[in-house]
Image (spheres, rainbow, N blue to C red):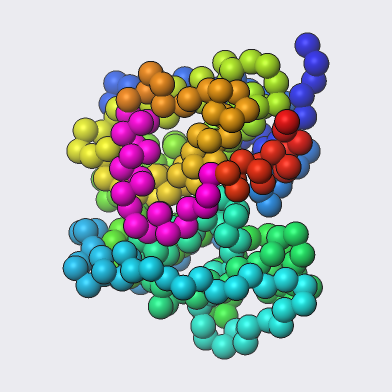
Amino acid sequence: MATRTNLLSNWPLHYASNNNIKIKIAPKFPTNPYPSQALFLRPPPRLSAKKTSAAPTSSMAATVGAEEVLPPVLDSSSDPPSLFDGTTRLYTSYICPYAQRVWIARNYKGLQENIKLVPIDLENRPHWYKEKVYAPNKVPALEHNNEVRGESLDLLKYVDSNFEGPALYPEELIKREFAEELLSYTDTFNRAVLFSLKGESESEISTALDYLETALFKFSDGPFFLGQFSLVDIAYAPFIERFHPLLLDVKKYDITIGRPMLTSWIEEMNKIDAYKQTKRDPQELIAVLKKRFSIK
């Protein structure tokens, strides 16, 4: 059997059981020579700011649903913003799924005025970004309280813990445990889909998607992974947004066939303004991914 190049970091794989639902994790893949964010291209979160567990208020919902005028993308010819002047900034890319995660969380919590977007051209990055802002030279990165933090999953928790707005992390222990299980599976899921795109077999795609379908059965108090909308949905949404049209285009594989829970989840996600504001044209995403991974 030919050796395959791994496109994502090699996360630990395991069998998990919660509430009498057992989920089989996808088969183990070869060791990855690249960092996970090479796909599209953690200090612990601090628990300090107030947050609410209830649904957004009417005023907050209006803020979340309002159209935002997006700032222009900064490239190597662009001057930096006034760094470390007390402004909270999310350094992002409109095309990067990892950065999109934090962008969605910011929108959902109604933080458009509190966290300013600074979009970076990943193909022509400003030299000052690596030198003065974030040495790893990746997005997303959050400038807050004169510090800069990175890694999308860590930033989801950080934004939820340190800013006001609807809570994205559940209070119930059983949901917290399942949330961590699902978050730890995200890179495994992405890796499985990308391997299948590069090869002939669809078994890895099916295994990964069936994992999500089974997970969506766990809680009956809503259509999302933890019942109610949470950071778990945010973690998966940018990748489903890309893999759904890409698999249709490349493999003629519809991820929703035979998966009613996943179908419903996609429909419900597309009703959330905070997410809709971050979405890209599917044809643009297909073109970017085909070029990125040399897929014909």
| Residue 72, image x, y percentages | 60, 73
Name the foreground residue: 14 vs 281.
281
Name the image quarter holding residue 173: top left
* Side (left or right) of 233 relative to 147: left
142 up-or-down from 77: above or below: above
The region drawn magenta spans 261-282
* Membership of 263 in magenta stretch: yes
* Side (left or right) of 28 relative to 180: right
* Side (left or right) of 131 relative to 103: right
Looking at the rendering, in which quadrant would you find the C terminus? top right
229 up-or-down from 55: above or below: above
Name the foreground residue: 96 vs 267.
267
Principal SS element in the magenta part? helix
Q: Is residue 51 visible?
A: no
* Membership of 173 in magenta stretch: no
Q: Residue pushed farthest front?
A: 283
Which residue is pictured at 40% across the width and 78% down the height?
113
| Residue 242, image x, y percentages | 54, 41
| Residue 155, image x, y percentages | 51, 59
